[in-house]
Image: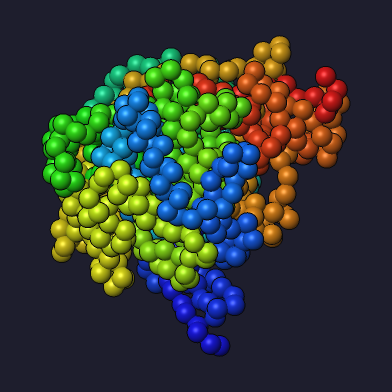
Amino acid sequence: MRGVREVMTHCPYCALQCPTRLRSDDEEVEVSPGSLSDGRPGALCRKGWTAPELLRTPDRLLQPLLRGADGELVPTDWDRALDFMAHRLRDLRTEHGSDVVGVLGGGGLTNEKAYLLGKFARIALGTSRIDYNGRFCMSAAAAAGNAAFGLDRGLPFPVTDLEDAQVVLLAGANPASTMPPLLRHLERAQLVVIDPRRTATARRAALHLQPAPGTDLALLQGMLHVAVVEGLVKREYVRERTVGFQGAWQQASAWWPERAEQVTGVPAAEQRAAVRLLAEAERSYVLSGRGIEQHTRGTDTAAALINLSLALGLPGREGGGYGCLTGQGNGQGGREHGQKADQLPGYRPLSDPVARAHVARVWGVPVESLPGPGPSACELLGMLGAPGGPRALLVFGSNPVVSAPHTNHVRERLAALDLLVVADFVLSETAALADVVLPVTQWAEEEGTLTNLEGRVLRRRRLLRPPGQARSDLDVLSGVAARLGQPAERFPTVPRLVFDELRAASRGGRADYSGIDYERLDAGEVLHWPCPTAGHPGTPRLFLERFAHPDGRARFAEVDHCDPAEIPDEDYPLHATTGRLLLHYQSGAQTRRISELAASAPNPFVEIHPDTAHALGLSDGELADIDSANGHVVARVRLDRGIRPDTVFVPFHFPGRGTANLLTGNALDPVSGMPQFKSVAVRVTAHGAA
Ligand code: SF4
């Protein structure tokens, strides 16, 4: 073979970030699994095995595009695209002030990109209006984790710890579809799964609890009730390592399992069996996923799950624990480096004067020039083009036209803008609406770092030159910043330099990266944050001695169930829940372009119980109309006995009239800003019957 190159990197998709060996001979790119952190062979799912096709997709954006006078996107060069963008941004800011520009980042951006994007928004644009699509993903669990433990890291232990588990509760998580290689770590455990659908994971479970969508909090209260009444609470642990148990119990005491059964549909006997399994095993883990988090009470629901875990004495000990399965590739790092509306690098609160002073010093700007916290992603999208709202939006690594709730509303708001700029490597549904489209690099064309679901910092390595005129997002930010009058050295384009600055900015913060550098990572060190000094070994397990609150104790939360924002009624008599499929990732902008994945999972569908379908006069494979108060979807019926008869499921990866988020609404969790993706009231009818 001529010109063979090989790099060790990681899959471009989910937060498991499977190690990947890439090999290229100038004609083909071959992929194979790399080694796990302990040297054992890793594995890839079909998304990982087929990811090289993404590097050769014929849809690849190779030149910047500008919308011409005739309304068409036409190719241009970088100088013209960036000059146009900077000129429009300057004019808008002069006329309306700095907050006229909004920025939407993404949980798939590398740490370096997420960091530089936050810095760019706050000092080159001077706007407070920046948030990212991780708001739709992890925000509720993160808020609950921070409140309970004083620190949020998806898994506060290495994923390999799960291999010794005897029992694992998966609450609203379906790793058999979303990250199949994770199941290798769960092979020895008995699984207890909470999900309204009999998912691929639920089919492996010893016990499957099927609550009605939007009732998880009531179920978890019922389970805490069981733990207390049956004497399964770890009293010594609760006394020595926690505060607030009485307040949590006061709320849960009213949720005897029979009452929880009435609300959730989960038999009291199953609630009892689940709690006994967890409590009586020596090594139990509780893992949370989007199913319980993506609700208007998402933070409270995640907090109720933490309450149960604390009552059973699981968090912060070896051989047990609580964690959250982050979804997006850099969902963890993406929320630590400053692209979130309320945060500065190091996972520091933007409102904290000490954090502001530290970061302003690193950035070399007056502290008073730093804007304050801004709106969360959905609030930001809802303000676009409205009086006092942003008139320009810059989108990096996100496709809100498919992934954000109430997508009709999102389209309306985007259309009201004076300037929409999208940086992506394919013409996503959002990029297709933009005034300026910027072609950027993707995984195997760039260097950088990501932080996986266990808080381990990983190197992304470059195998290929970017095609055409594609550039790194770092170059884009630097180019625009220079045109807005920023000194060049303030916006470096070399990933290693950006990471070194990120380390300095994170020093002393909750997510302290200051002891991690490219040399250590390239030497094969396994480093989980916090890692505060060059000689520090990193922290694979958090909370073993103490939690991160000043008194070292975890907090129970006083939470209670209330109905979700939308509940079925006469007009919309069914619950709809949205979610992911084995063969697609996020908005599908990437995986829909992989021939094998697209051929196997080409179309949107609505999963429905055969009895429900029969009652509605629907049969397998026919087109159905799905209507909610927010919008209308057309999809083929797929019968499945594993779903609750009062519930339908619509995957969210597809555009057009099958976009699941046409159905979802604007209701948000007041704590985290999480939208309600998992519980929408709908009506399903034969297509065209209405
Ligand atoms: Fe990629 Fe996630 Fe599949 Fe691993 S599980 S190969 S990271 S998509």
Residue 324 sits above or below residue 412 on the image: below
| Quarter the C terminus occupies | top right
Image vertical order of residue 200 relative to residue 676, above or below:
below
Task: Please name whichever residue, 399 or 604, is drawn nearer the observer in this view of the structure.
Answer: 399
Looking at the picture, the colour scheme in use is rainbow
Q: 564 or 496, which is in the foreground?
A: 496
Where is the N terminus found, in terms of image quarters?
A: bottom right
Between 581 and 255, the one lying in front of the other is: 581
Residue at 45% across, 50% down: 80
* 354, 233: nearer the viewer: 354
Q: Residue furthest top?
A: 570
Image coordinates for residue 615, horizontal then vertical, percent: 83, 23
Question: Residue 431: horizontal and vertical position, in percent?
Answer: 55, 43
In the picture, residue 264 is in which quadrant? top right
Look at the picture and state if 53 lies above or below 169. Answer: below
Residue at image coords 39%, 52%: 476
